[in-house]
Amino acid sequence: MSIQKVQILLECFLSSVDLGKNRKKMGITYAEIELISGDDVALHRRGYIPEDQIKSMKVKALVDSGASLLIITEYIKNQLNLLKIDEQQAELADGSVMDVEVVGPVEIRFENRKAIVSAMVLPNSKVVLLGAIPMQSMDVLIDLKQENLIVNPKSPDTARMFLK
Amino acid sequence: MVNFRVGILPALLISRLMEMKTENMGITYAEIELIRSDDRALFREGYIREDQIKSVKVRAMVDSGSSMLAIPESIKNQLNLLKLDEKQAELADGSILRLEIVGPIEIRFENRIATVSAMVVPNSNVVLLGAIPMQDMDVLIDPKRERLIVNPESPDIARMLLK
């Protein structure tokens, strides 16, 4: 094995250790979700592009019941080539209000659930926040003790919505 | 007597409407009670009466994205909480604030109790119930019903992990 290879392996190992440490901290729950470009899904359905050209990415999202929407980074917006559809205001925990871009549609997949939502793009942020509305739409529960997002055990096979 | 009833109904309706107004954009709120732990200790040791224990009932925003309990200045003053420490808090936009840590506070939600310290957020008027107190109380968040629920696997008493 060459020295370069060893160096690369070592770097990979160190970065994975570091990420692991960063991701499980202070009681915060993360969930593995897949984000898919909604436009690409539509184009595929209509036969314009093959399935393997649908842009998607897997991310570890911070489960945030205190956020309303899905919140993504500039990087993900560019990767999925999402279009701006609106501008909205976002209120942060210290009461400050900022104008942010809303892009979409984004399809979110988590285990057997999916939701189609629009997302806020937060500049200078490095995390994806999975907010309340997408979680409502997927019918999931947050188990804080286990630091896990779980599909609603009362309706495990399919999301059950209220129509009342 | 009749007038009294007529008077109280619209007031109830208005307060109900105000409650509904705060339940916006899918966010879950929970009715919790915050109690000054020092007062409980003083009461246990016989220095004060039970009715002198300072406590406040609040409608807290259930926030799995925040680590600790976060309270506004007004609640810190109401419960006469002492500063224990200072910590940094990172907001969603990546900015970092230096905040005061006060405590101890006893949180009660349904049949659950947790004793924690809290971050004081100036210029804020909401209480955020963060992940650590919720872990301690062994509760689940049901975003669809916008409800905080005690863990159905252990409804009568919080079950912790010891592994």
Image (cartoon, coloured by chain):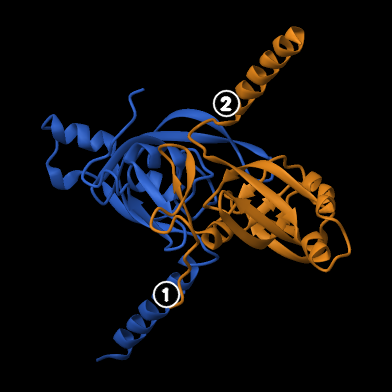
Chain colours: A blue, B orange
The residue that disc 1 covers is: A15
What residue is rendered at 67% in x and 62% in y? B116
Of residue A112 and residue B56, the one placed in the foreground of this image is: B56
Q: Mark 2 lies on which chain?
A: B
Can residue B135 be seen by looking at this rendering? yes
User: Where is B44 relative to A156, above or below?
Assistant: below
Label placed on residue B20: 2
| The C terminus of chain B lies in quadrant | bottom left
- Residue that appears at 38% across and 57% down: B153
Few, some or many residues within 10 Å of mark 2 (<14, 14–19, 20+)? few
Tell me which corner region of the image, top left, top right, bottom left or bottom right, holds residue A40: top left
Residue visible at 74% across and 59% down in the picture: B98
Of all residues shown, which one is farthest toward the right? B47
Secondary structure of the residue carrying numbered label 2:
helix
Chain at numbered mark 1: A
Quadrant (top left/top right/bottom left/bottom right) for the N terminus of chain B: top right
Q: Position of residue A134 (x, y in %)?
A: 39, 39
- Which of the 4 image quarters holds residue B99? bottom right
The correct choice, above or below, for A133 with respect to A2 in the image is above
